[in-house]
Image (cartoon, rainbow, N blue to C red):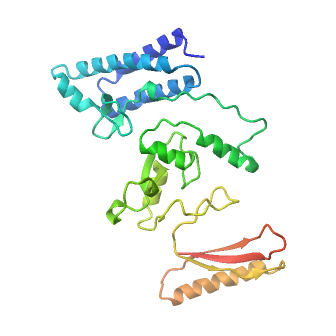
C-alpha cells in the first residue's frame, strides 16, 4: 500500500495553501503549522511502501520553501536567506534544513519518517489489564517517534515512557532533555546523566526549589496506585513495627504514632507541623507478618 495520486495531489494543495498563509506569520508559528500537517500525513502512510513518495514530496517542498524565502525577502541575496533560514540540526547530515534559528525549531522532512509496519494487537489484550503490562511496554518501546538526535537514544533507553509520570512520551506533549546533575554542579551531557521528560514534568521537577530528584532512574515506582508513581527526595522518617495479627484498634494505634511524630518534630526546634501519612504495607507472602508504618514528609 502506498499513497494514491489523488491523495498526493490533495496533500500538495493543502501544503501550498499553508505556505501562502504563513507568509506574514513568525517563522516559529509557520513551522509549527507545517509540521502538524507533515507529521500527521506521514504517520498515516508510514505503514506502507511510501519511502519514494516521501522523498519526492521533499523535493517539491524544497521548491515551496525557496519561493517562500524569495517572497518574504525579495531584496535579499540567496546567501543571506540561507544564513538566516537554512542550517543543520544535531543527529542529521542535512545541511539545508528549513529552521528558525532563534529558537531551534525546524521543518520536518518526510523522508525522515521511518517505514514501520503495523503491529496487530493480540486478541483480548487490553491496556487496562495489569497482567499485560510488559506486553504494552514492549509495544510502546518499538514505536518510532518524530524526534531526532540524542532524544532518540533516550527514548529507546527509557522504552518510550517518561520516568517521572510513567506515561507514554509520544502523547503529543513537547519533550525536554533533563540533566540529572546540572552542568553548574559538574554535570555533563552523557546519556547516563540525561533523561527525556515531558515539558510539564520537567517544569514540575525544577519547581521544587532544590528538592528535585537526584536521579530519576534510581527512584522506585510505587505499585498499586497509578497516581502515586514515585517517592520524592524529601526528608523521610519512617517507623515500621511488625504486626503479625490483625488488630481492631489499628487506626487508633496509627493516630498515636502520627501525634508522636509531630511532637518529636516540634521538639527539634521546628515551628511548623510535618505531613504525616499512616500506611499499612501487607506482604504477598502469607507466612510473613504484615508491616504497618508511618512516613513523615517535611
Q: Position of residue 25 (x, y in %)?
A: 31, 28
Query: Residue at position x 58%, y 62% from top?
Result: 230
Q: Position of residue 150 (x, y in %)?
A: 43, 45
Identify the image quadrant of the N terminus: top right
The foreground one among 34 and 124 is: 124
Please determine whether, in this image, residue 189 is positioned above or below residue 120.
Answer: below
**226 to the left or right of 66:** right
Query: Residue at position x 29%, y 25% from top?
Result: 24
Query: Residue at position x 48%, y 45% from top?
Result: 153
Q: Tell me, yes or no, if residue 90 can be seen here.
A: yes
**235 to the left or right of 123:** left
Q: Tell me, yes or no, if residue 17 can be seen here.
A: no
**232 to the left or right of 99:** right
Residue 203: quarter of image:
bottom left
Query: What is the number of callouts on the image?
Result: 0
Residue 26: quarter of image:
top left
The foreground one among 114 and 71 is: 114
- Residue lying at the far top in this picture: please name it: 5
Q: Position of residue 35 (x, y in %)?
A: 43, 29
Amino acid at each position: 500500500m502506498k499513497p494514491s495520486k489523488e491523495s498526493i495531489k490533495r496533500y500538495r494543495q493543502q501544503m501550498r495553501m499553508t505556505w501562502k498563509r504563513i507568509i506574514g506569520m513568525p517563522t516559529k508559528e509557520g513551522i509549527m503549522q507545517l509540521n502538524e500537517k507533515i507529521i500527521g500525513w506521514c504517520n498515516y502512510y508510514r505503514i506502507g511502501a511510501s519511502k519514494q513518495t516521501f522523498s519526492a514530496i521533499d523535493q517539491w517542498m524544497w521548491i515551496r520553501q525557496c519561493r517562500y524565502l524569495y517572497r518574504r525577502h525579495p531584496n535579499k541575496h540567496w546567501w543571506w536567506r540561507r544564513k538566516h533560514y537554512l542550517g543543520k540540526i544535531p543527529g542529521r547530515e542535512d545541511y539545508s534544513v528549513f529552521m528558525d534559528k532563534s529558537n531551534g525549531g525546524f521543518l520536518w522532512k518526510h523522508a525522515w519518517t521511518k517505514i514501520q509496519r503495523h503491529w496487530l494487537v493480540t486478541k483480548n489484550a487490553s491496556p487496562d489489564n495489569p497482567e499485560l503490562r510488559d506486553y504494552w511496554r514492549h509495544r510502546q518501546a518499538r514505536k518510532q517517534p518524530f524526534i531526532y538526535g540524542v532524544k532518540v537514544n533516550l527514548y529507546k533507553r527509557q522504552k518510550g515512557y517518561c520516568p517521572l509520570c510513567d506515561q507514554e512520551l509520544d502523547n503529543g506533549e513537547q519533550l525536554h532533555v533533563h540533566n540529572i546533575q546540572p552542568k553548574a554542579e559538574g554535570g555533563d551531557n552523557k546519556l547516563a546523566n540525561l533523561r527525556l521528560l515531558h515539558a510539564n514534568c520537567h517544569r514540575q521537577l525544577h519547581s521544587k526549589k532544590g528538592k528535585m530528584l537526584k536521579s530519576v532512574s534510581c527512584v522506585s515506582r510505587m505499585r498499586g496506585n497509578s497516581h502515586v508513581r514515585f517517592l520524592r527526595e524529601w526528608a523521610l522518617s519512617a517507623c515500621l513495627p511488625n504486626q503479625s495479627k490483625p488488630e481492631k484498634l489499628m487506626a487508633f494505634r496509627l493516630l498515636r504514632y502520627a501525634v508522636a511524630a509531630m511532637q518529636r518534630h516540634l521538639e527539634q526546634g521546628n515551628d511548623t507541623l510535618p505531613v504525616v501519612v499512616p500506611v499499612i504495607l501487607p506482604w504477598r507472602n502469607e507466612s510473613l507478618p504484615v508491616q504497618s508504618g508511618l512516613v513523615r514528609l517535611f
